[in-house]
């Protein structure tokens, strides 16, 4: 019997869709199978409350690879990025720290708090830009296996070595520091103003179970800096229609290239015949055949759930079991009858079109981490807030608003486990903390959606609710992501591939894993 | 014609600081025929490896062990002839689990496994494999530590050769171990131990080795490296505690003084160096606090990089970026010492009355969470209310530490910050730290408060004042991933040569760092000899 498809992609998240689109572009007959009724995985827009649209999980975009936007002609398929230009950090003394799109305005604002930091800021920005550029080629390459003696791997290693040499000593050492230091220590070398360090270091803790003083957090800081340099769009942006619109644009591109996409189709197992991949078995028992199967799910699901035991070497099973997920963040989405009124900047202003960061000091963030270390959610968490309806009025009825609050820390492994009561207590802690800075918030809430890491796992399938399909820790990057010898999108089962954020280069709405996996499958690498 | 009298320098090399590294460097250079002077600010040689009579007849050591003594130094300087006697205590470490039970870890792998079985049979089964793996991984660090730090950016063949040699040894580890090493170094010691074990008291006992002397908790990235660093040079299965000598750490420095003197080294104690003399952009000697100036072709400083480069040399001799990098070195001493002179050995509830189990260390570290909570305090500038305590009774091993029938208890306390929130260290704060430590230990030895005759408390501030250790950092700068190998003491200057001709750094602030006794000094001396040959 002839196979209906050349390749099946499991999971209609953005990486799975990117992968499918690239395979279809190369002429393959591709089928995407998505468990839920809508595409996107963690990048979805849903109308949870009538008239109000939420980017339920992932809410901003900056890392989406420009070559993907170009190759798949995403703007033609409905992708429209609106800039998020500013970030304000309300301070406990009633003041605020602002960061605006405009360089001079930015400098003036910093100068108001610390002339020294205003001086250092440009130098810092330049160095981080260099660092991000230094890492970029690494992100774009299929990681070589350092233990392999194959010509391809040796060439890859040589390429990495040459690349680092070309950086020169000063930048190489700066990069090494970024890879190994804590974001707090790294920023301490540059700045003195606490709220500035806190707000910067906050991007170093997102999605990981580390505090700003834990070594390893400086790399995540860089990972988040990456988006600011690509020139496709500046800094962080918001997709018109929410993050689901990104997924839909990629899905549309894939369809236009000939891919078939089925939703509400849950894959139970990968079908293996004669030692190689033959297709998939759906939960309803249907078999769909294809010689290539690509999993966009996280490593634990890809290797341990979708395969029958016995197809993998013990070493790999161990490595996947040890892979750290530890979801550390949650989300609170609010439908609002009116805009929040921040004490530090009263009224409706430009600041409501950007991000609002609840990160008044390093100690604040560190204490938030302390709560989580011992199995509690942060009583006063770090929060990254945006009001999408200010940027894209289509997200809420006229005069009304939606507010997206990313919250950390909310540990997946909560002492005693998550319950409905604890979810609500967590939501209360979030609202009460924001209300310290915007007192009208509680009475403006029409509807509240609270999402714990357990909810993220249950709804999207992300193990332990980790938004990056596994922590972006140094020992889980590059040729170690997700496991040594299996970092090149292949698996020990012939014809079975991986393309999710659990592979190099990792999470964020980047699409790089999906693309690189497709190149590997197509043999273009 | 202008004439200038050029006096030949009095010494080939002046070594600043007579700690283990300074003495090893001096002996190495003297052995190669150099005229060497060692200048020591204190009355006694040894630096941190010195005993102190803190009460009449009672001695205590600042350090509980001398660290790892690498084969290359032991062979080069013929340590076997120095008359040193190693103490091999058993058990190595005793940890109360908080419920009245104790974990005893021994050098003997099977014996430890049996002791672990009381807490978890699964952990006992995994123990031999863990021991073997950690020994192999630390063995690789041992290789890296036996030579100057590899220069990853090396371009010349001469520089590349050592790198290839290290690379070959790394490959020689085998594929699994090699990946395991790369994977392990950036991990937290909690993650490492959680991968292997389930018993809290076992993980607490081992985890303490991953946080020793740093201001990071067991959940901080890179503490798995610290764990391996502190295993370098140890026997397989011997965790917590490196080479211990009969007579304490002082016996090593005394032996080194004898060795150096025998090789013609001049040692001057009570000779505090006030600055390094620089002429025509070259270090040419030292000035003592007394005003005396002594000249030499090269100066090797075994004191820490901040003191050497910021205090002893005029700032105008260096580029501002270089000095900024030196100021950015993280020191952050986190350890205090409490020494107790005891009328007799107090009974530890649940242990033998004669101290049979106390020849090694008694460790208050019942779990990783306990250690992490101790760390939480220091993050905010406070002394841990429930610190990690490492207790030794040296007089049980060597009666010369105390008058007949009496005992000395030496307690290392972590975390104790150098910088206190809202205050500075003073006599009252030291005293309350001492009280707190005695009260904590009284939970295990209820009679302890009644048998304390004298007490000495050494805070990180005291370590800075008395021993010249910046911020009380016993390792001359934290041993964290961003401050090791080619990053130590600062990136770009990791080959012992400082950016001032004739000035070398060879203390624990240089590769391979603290706890690898004498190797930084030895490698710095070798660098001086190599440079001289080349010149």
Image (tube, grey):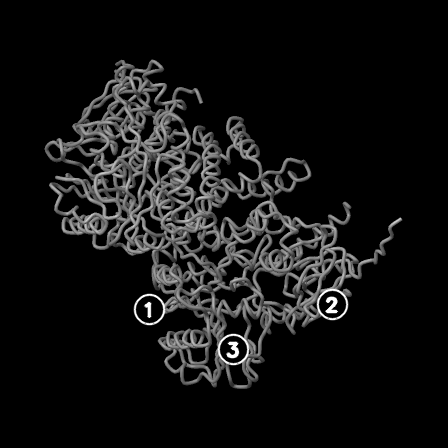
- Which subunit holds the residue at mark 3? B
Q: Are marks 3 and 1 on the same chain?
A: yes
Q: Nearer the viewer, residue A453 or A293?
A: A453
SS class of the residue under badge 1?
Answer: loop
Q: The disc numbered 2 marks a residue on which chain?
A: B
**Crowding near the residue tagged with mark 3, few <14, some 14–19, many ≥20 C-alpha atoms within 10 Å:** many
Location of residue A476 by image quarter: top left
Residue at (13% x, 31% y) in the render: A398
Q: Quadrant of residue A79?
A: top left
Q: Are marks 2 and 3 on the same chain?
A: yes
Q: Are marks 3 and 1 in contact (CB under 8 Å)?
A: no
Q: Secondary structure at mark 3?
A: helix
Q: Position of residue B1 (x, y in %)?
A: 89, 48
Among numbered discs 3 and 1, the one appearing first in the sequence: 1
Sequence order check, earlier mark of 2 and 3: 2
Give the residue number, with chain letter if any, for mark 1.
B98
SS under mark 2: loop
Q: Nearer the viewer, residue A206 or A41?
A: A206
Front of the two marks 2 and 3: 2
The percent position of residue B368, horizontal first and vertical second, equals 36, 59
Disc 3 and disc 1: Cα gap in Å? 25 Å
Q: Is residue A92 visible?
A: yes
Q: Is residue B265 above or below residue A206?
A: below
Residue occupying image coordinates x 22% and y 33%: A390
Q: Which residue is identified by label 2?
A: B292
- Residue underneath mark 3: B396
Q: Position of residue A13 (x, y in %)?
A: 27, 29
- Disc 2 to disc 3, how far (Cα)? 45 Å
Give the residue at x 58% y 53%: B512
Q: Residues within 10 Å of mark 1 (few under 14, many from 20)?
A: some
The answer to whether residue A173 is above or below residue B414 is above
Do the residues bearing badges 1 and 2 touch, measured as CB atoms within 8 Å?
A: no
């Amino acid at each position: 019997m002839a196979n209906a498809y050349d390749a099946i992609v499991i999971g209609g998240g953005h990486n799975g869709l990117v992968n499918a689109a690239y395979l279809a572009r190369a002429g393959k007959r591709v089928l995407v199978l998505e468990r839920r009724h809508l595409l996107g995985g963690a990048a979805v827009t849903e109308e949870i409350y009538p008239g109000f649209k939420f980017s339920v999980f992932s809410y901003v975009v900056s890392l989406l690879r420009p070559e993907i936007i170009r190759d798949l002609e995403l703007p033609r398929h409905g992708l429209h990025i609106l800039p998020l230009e500013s970030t304000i950090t309300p301070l406990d003394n009633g003041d605020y720290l602002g960061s605006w799109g405009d360089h001079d305005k930015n400098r003036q604002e910093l100068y108001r708090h610390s002339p020294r930091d205003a001086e250092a800021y440009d130098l810092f920005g330049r160095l981080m830009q260099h660092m991000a550029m230094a890492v970029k080629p690494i992100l774009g390459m299929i990681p070589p296996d350092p233990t392999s003696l194959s010509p391809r791997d040796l060439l890859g290693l040589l390429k990495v070595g040459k690349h680092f040499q070309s950086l020169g000593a000063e930048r190489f050492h700066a990069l090494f520091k970024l890879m190994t230091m804590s974001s707090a220590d790294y920023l301490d070398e540059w700045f003195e103003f606490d709220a500035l360090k806190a707000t910067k270091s906050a991007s170093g803790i997102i999605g990981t179970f580390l505090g700003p003083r834990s070594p390893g957090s400086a790399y995540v800081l860089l990972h988040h800096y990456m988006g600011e340099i690509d020139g496709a769009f500046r800094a962080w942006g918001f997709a018109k229609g929410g993050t689901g619109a990104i997924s839909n644009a990629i899905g549309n591109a894939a369809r236009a290239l000939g891919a078939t996409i089925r939703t509400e189709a849950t894959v139970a197992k990968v079908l293996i015949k004669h030692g190689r991949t033959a297709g998939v078995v759906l939960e309803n028992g249907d078999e769909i055949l294809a010689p290539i199967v690509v999993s966009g799910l996280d490593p634990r699901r890809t290797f341990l759930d979708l395969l029958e035991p016995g197809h993998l070497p013990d070493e790999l099973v161990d490595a996947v079991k040890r892979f750290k997920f530890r979801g550390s963040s949650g989300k609170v989405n609010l439908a609002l009858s009116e805009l929040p009124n921040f004490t530090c900047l009263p009224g409706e202003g430009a600041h409501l079109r950007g991000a609002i960061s609840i990160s008044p000091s390093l100690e604040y963030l560190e204490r938030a981490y302390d709560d989580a270390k011992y199995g509690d959610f942060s009583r006063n968490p770090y929060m990254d807030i945006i009001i999408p309806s200010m940027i894209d009025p289509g997200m809420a009825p006229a005069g009304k608003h939606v507010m997206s609050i990313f919250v950390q820390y909310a540990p997946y492994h909560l002492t005693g486990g998550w319950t409905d009561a604890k979810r609500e207590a967590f939501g209360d802690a979030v609202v009460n903390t924001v209300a310290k800075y915007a007192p009208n918030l509680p009475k403006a809430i029409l509807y509240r959606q609270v999402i714990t890491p357990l909810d993220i796992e249950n709804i999207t399938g992300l193990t332990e609710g980790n938004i990056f399909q596994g922590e972006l820790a140094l020992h889980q990057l590059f040729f170690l992501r997700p496991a040594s010898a299996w970092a090149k999108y292949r698996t020990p089962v012939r014809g079975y591939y991986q393309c999710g954020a659990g592979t190099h280069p990792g999470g964020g709405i980047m699409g790089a894993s999906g693309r690189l996996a497709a190149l590997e499958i197509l043999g273009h690498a | 014609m202008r004439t200038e009298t050029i006096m030949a320098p009095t010494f080939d090399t002046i070594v600043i600081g007579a700690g283990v590294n300074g003495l090893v460097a001096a002996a190495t250079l003297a052995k190669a025929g150099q005229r060497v002077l060692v200048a020591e600010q204190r009355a006694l040689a040894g630096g941190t490896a010195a005993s102190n009579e803190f009460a009449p007849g009672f001695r205590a050591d600042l350090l509980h062990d001398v660290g790892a003594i690498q084969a290359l130094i032991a062979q080069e300087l013929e340590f076997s002839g120095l008359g040193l006697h190693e103490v091999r205590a058993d058990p190595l470490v005793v940890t109360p689990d908080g419920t009245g039970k104790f974990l005893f870890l021994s050098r003997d792998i099977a014996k430890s496994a049996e002791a672990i079985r009381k807490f978890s049979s699964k952990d006992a089964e995994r123990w031999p494999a863990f021991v073997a793996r950690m020994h192999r991984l630390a063995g690789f660090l041992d290789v890296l530590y036996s030579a100057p730090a590899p220069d990853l950016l090396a371009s010349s063949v001469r520089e590349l050769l050592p790198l290839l040699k290290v690379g070959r040894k790394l490959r020689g580890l085998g594929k699994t171990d090699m990946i395991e090493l790369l994977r392990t170094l950036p991990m937290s010691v909690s993650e490492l131990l959680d991968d292997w074990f389930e018993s809290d008291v076992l993980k607490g006992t081992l985890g303490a080795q991953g946080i020793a002397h740093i201001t990071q908790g067991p959940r901080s990235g890179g503490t798995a490296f610290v764990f391996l660093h502190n295993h370098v040079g140890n026997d397989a299965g011997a965790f917590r505690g490196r080479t211990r000598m009969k007579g304490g750490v002082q016996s090593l420095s005394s032996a080194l003084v004898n060795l150096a003197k025998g090789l013609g080294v001049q040692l001057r104690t009570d000779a505090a160096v006030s600055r390094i003399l620089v002429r025509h952009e070259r270090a040419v000697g030292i000035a003592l606090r007394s005003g005396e100036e002594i000249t030499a072709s090269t100066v090797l400083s075994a004191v820490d990089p901040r003191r050497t480069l910021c205090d002893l040399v005029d700032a105008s001799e260096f580029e501002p970026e270089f000095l900024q990098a030196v100021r950015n070195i993280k020191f952050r001493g986190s350890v205090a010492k409490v020494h107790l002179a005891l009328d007799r050995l107090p009974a530890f509830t649940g242990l033998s009355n004669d101290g049979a189990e106390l020849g090694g260390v008694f460790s208050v570290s019942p779990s990783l969470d306990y250690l992490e909570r101790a760390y939480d305090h220091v993050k905010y500038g406070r002394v841990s209310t429930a610190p990690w305590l490492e207790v030794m009774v040296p007089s049980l091993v060597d009666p010369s530490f105390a008058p007949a029938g009496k005992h000395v208890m030496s307690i290392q306390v972590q975390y104790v910050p150098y910088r206190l929130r809202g205050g500075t260290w003073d006599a009252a704060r030291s005293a309350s730290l001492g009280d707190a430590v005695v009260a904590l230990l009284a939970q295990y030895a209820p009679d302890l408060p009644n048998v304390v005759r004298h007490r000495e408390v050494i805070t990180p501030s005291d370590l800075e004042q008395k021993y010249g250790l910046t911020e009380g950092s016993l390792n001359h700068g934290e041993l964290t991933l961003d401050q090791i190998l080619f990053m130590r003491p600062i990136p770009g200057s990791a080959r012992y040569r400082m950016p001032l001709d004739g000035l070398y750094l060879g203390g624990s602030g240089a590769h391979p760092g603290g706890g690898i006794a004498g190797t930084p000094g030895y490698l710095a001396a070798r660098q001086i000899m190599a440079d001289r040959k080349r010149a």
